Image: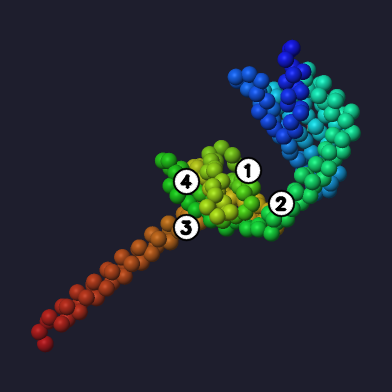
């Protein structure tokens, strides 16, 4: 504890995050500055500073509280010093305005100007054994935040659901794939819902197990008609051959 005032002095005398080397191993002080923006109303915006010394969470500034709170011996002392310092009090107010109000408004505007809504596909592939796999894919959207959910007969499903990472396309846009593996019943209605800031309302994509079956029926019917056609045609050909080969 003897070296503590020395360390504090060393670190506090330099303002920016700095390596306060006091011995061979060094000491590290760093701070996280962050904004909690629940709405763009400046009163609702919270500015926070998490202050660490040697990986120890030392103190925090919270703009809603309006001052610093210490969590360690050094943190308690430093927090009370900062709270009495009118320059520090003013500086944090200015920082809140600059970082959390002005800068966040600027960043939000840039994001808003570049919103791209996702284009979505819902495909069916084979799952394991008798299972079916549905793949709901959202392509080329910005910003990154997106929500994809599944409904089966009106109820949200989470079991059998997996997601890919939201991957970058190399430009500023992203893609995400969600997979639902399940054993379809006779009349299952499944849908994939996509929510994104680029969509004015959630978009819903449907899959119906009976559609799959009637398509199979359609194919069977088509093949049957073809076979029937072939039989009629070949019997016609045989008759024609007989007719043409019979001597006149
Ligand atoms: C900041 O302080 C306010 C008021 O006490 C509290 O509601 C809020 O949760 C604090 N924020 C954080 C991130 O701790």
| Residue 208 seen from this side | no
Identify the image quadrant of the C terminus. Answer: bottom left
Disc number lying in front (1 or 2): 2
- Residue at numbered disc 3: 214
Tell me the SS state at disc 4.
strand
Residues packed near mark 1 inside 10 Å, few (<14), some (14 to 19) or many (20 plus): few
Which sits in the foreground, 41 or 6?
Answer: 6
Which sits in the foreground, 23 or 71?
Answer: 23
Ligand 1 within 8 A of label 2's CB? no
Ligand 1 within 8 A of label 1's CB? no
**Quarter of the view holding residue 119:** bottom right
Classify 131 as above or below 7: below
Instruction: Please tell me the numbered disc located at residue 156.
Output: 1
Left/right of residue 73 with respect to residue 178 in the rendered view = right
- Residue at numbered disc 2: 107
- Residue at numbered disc 4: 132
Q: Earlier in the sequence, mark 1 or mark 2?
A: 2
Disc number lying in front (2 or 3): 2
Tell me the SS state at disc 1.
strand
Residue at the (83%, 48%) spot, across then down: 41
Q: Earlier in the sequence, mark 2 or mark 3?
A: 2
Residues packed near mark 2 inside 10 Å, few (<14), some (14 to 19) or many (20 plus): few
Residues packed near mark 3 inside 10 Å, few (<14), some (14 to 19) or many (20 plus): few
Residue at the (77%, 35%) spot, across then down: 48
Residue at the (55%, 55%) spot, across then down: 171
Whether the residues at callouts 3 and 1 have beta carbons within 8 Å, the answer is no
């Amino acid at each position: 504890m003897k070296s503590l005032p020395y360390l504090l002095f060393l670190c506090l005398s330099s303002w920016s995050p700095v390596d306060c080397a006091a011995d061979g191993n060094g000491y590290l002080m760093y701070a996280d500055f962050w904004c909690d923006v629940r709405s763009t109303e400046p009163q609702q915006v919270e500015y926070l500073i998490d202050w660490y010394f040697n990986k120890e969470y030392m103190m925090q500034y919270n703009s809603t509280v309006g001052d610093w709170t210490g969590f360690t011996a050094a943190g308690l002392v430093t927090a009370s010093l900062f709270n009495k310092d009118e320059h520090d009090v003013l500086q944090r107010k200015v920082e809140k305005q600059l970082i959390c109000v002005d800068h966040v408004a600027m960043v939000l505007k840039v994001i808003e100007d570049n919103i791209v809504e996702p284009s979505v596909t819902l495909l069916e592939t084979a799952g394991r054994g008798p299972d079916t796999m549905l793949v709901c894919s959202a392509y080329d959207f910005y910003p990154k935040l997106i929500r994809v959910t599944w409904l089966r007969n009106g109820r949200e499903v989470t079991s059998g659901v997996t997601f890919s990472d939201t991957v970058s396309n190399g430009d500023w846009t992203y893609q995400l794939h969600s997979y639902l593996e399940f054993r379809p019943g006779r009349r299952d209605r499944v849908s994939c819902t996509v929510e994104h800031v680029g969509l004015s309302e959630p978009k819903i994509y449907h899959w119906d197990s009976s559609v799959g079956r009637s398509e199979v029926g359609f194919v069977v019917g088509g093949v049957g008609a073809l076979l029937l056609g072939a039989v009629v045609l070949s019997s016609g050909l045989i008759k024609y051959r007989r007719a043409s080969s019979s001597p006149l």
